[in-house]
Image: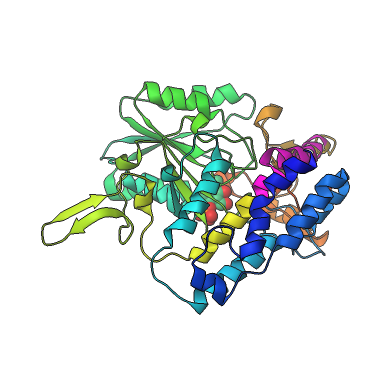
Amino acid sequence: MNRKEFLKMTAGLAAAGATGLPFAPLVSRAAAAPAPSPEPFAARLAQAAASGDDAFFWQLLREQFILDPDWIFLNFGGLGSSPLPVIDALVGFLRAEERAPSAGHDEKPWQAVKDKLARALGPSCRREDLGLIGGATEGVNVIVNGLPLKRGDEVVTSTHEHVAVHSALLNRMQKDGIAIRLFEPDIARAAGNVERIARLVTPRTRLIIFSHVSCTTGQLFPVREIASLARAKNIWFALDGAQAPVNAPFDIAATGVDFYTCSTHKWMMGPKRTGFIYARPGMAEVLRPQTVGGGSSLRYDVAKGEFVLKPTAERFESGTQNDALFYALGTALDLVATIGADRIQARCKPMAERFYRGLADIPGVERLSPEEEAYRTLMIGFRMASHPMTEIMQHLGKDKIRARPVSEDGLNSIRVSFYLNNRDEDVTAALESLKTLTA
Ligand SMILES: Cc1ncc(COP(=O)(O)O)c(C=O)c1O
């Protein structure tokens, strides 16, 4: 990237510094308490990019995380850590809100966040396809409870799902008698997953829902092929994308999905309890929101018994929002756009890959991430027959390494994530720690 291109990209971050808000603010709020200016950071980042010194550029980004320096944090997939420009923006937006509380939205900045999100999700994603919500758990519930499923209808999902997906399905099973059909992810061949799902499909199958990237092993699924299968059989297709955007190459429309949800407080570095729900154009009306209120409808008139829900994903936004969270998400999205999701992957994937390869040299380690490199992400899963996950976690903890135990599907394994806070020496430290466990 040359200096001119980079300066163009950093315009969003710099503009945030100029006004205190990354978009046109309510004048009264901006005047009352402008957010701290991230402009010096944007300028420093631009300088670092222009210097051509890669190490300097990534070190500057690393310094923006206030993670405990005594620990090696390998759990961005568990919960991200927002970098300083995002934290500072959040505090500024909160202060502005508390100086001049105002119910309802200032539509312009709210929509501007959605524009940024749409840009991050792919070239044909539109703001009206997106609803801003609290995270993937909420989004999965919107999907599973919003579809018109009846007793005996079948839903296909994987055994490796996060509790969010399994809980929502079990809840609907108890409430409405849907049936759950499970496939075991195939880590040897991506195409094997398409075949396993196809084998479960019956004339009663109404929905296929699983994670775009699994929380257990970081497995990326061949979703386009599965979308084609679903479309051909007239089955709704939904993805839990809590682990996908930025962690893996991403274009939401290209997945072919009908519905998608994500927590933006992981790889997108937004504040906690931010996320989105996506409905493919024309599909939002298929989902009946279970929570409605101010913001959900085009018009309502209780005397006439009239209630017209919005036809877009905005129908899932209702009631008072914590605007500051989402405005700061806008700052996080600016940062991701400034660096570039592809550059983040290019920086972090070699660390994950070196770890994956290194595991092969440790006796007794079983690698659980996909064998085909294209389906591996920045998260790697493994286990050891000789040590349950709790012992491995304790051992890593003694070496001040934070990972994530994986109890889903009885895997009894460990998952590690490599991100912008990490360096190559963290990979070495994690591998060395595991070697001493088996020595
Ligand atoms: C695949 C997956 N789905 C859903 C969730 C739940 O996300 P949240 O707790 O942000 O709603 C997670 C969180 O780790 C996840 O990894």
Q: How many marks?
A: 0
132 left or right, relative to 304: right
Residue drawn at 32 percent across, 43 percent down: 287
The span shown in magenta is 335-357
Q: Please tell me whether residue 311 is drawn above or below residue 103 in the rendered image.
A: above
Question: x%, y% of residue 343?
Answer: 73, 39
What is the quadrant of residue 202 in the picture? top left
What is the quadrant of residue 90 in the picture? bottom right
Q: Is residue 382 magenta?
A: no
Question: x%, y% of residue 68?
Answer: 77, 65
The quarter of the picture where the N terminus appears is: top right
**Outermost bottom residue:** 99
296 left or right, relative to 35: left
Query: Who is closer to the viewer here, 142 or 271?
Result: 271
Residue drawn at 56 percent across, 74 percent down: 31
Residue drawn at 48 percent across, 64 percent down: 323
Asked if residue 74 can be seen in this view, the reply is: yes
286 left or right, relative to 260: left
Question: x%, y% of residue 206?
Answer: 34, 33
Asked if residue 424 can be seen in this view, the reply is: no
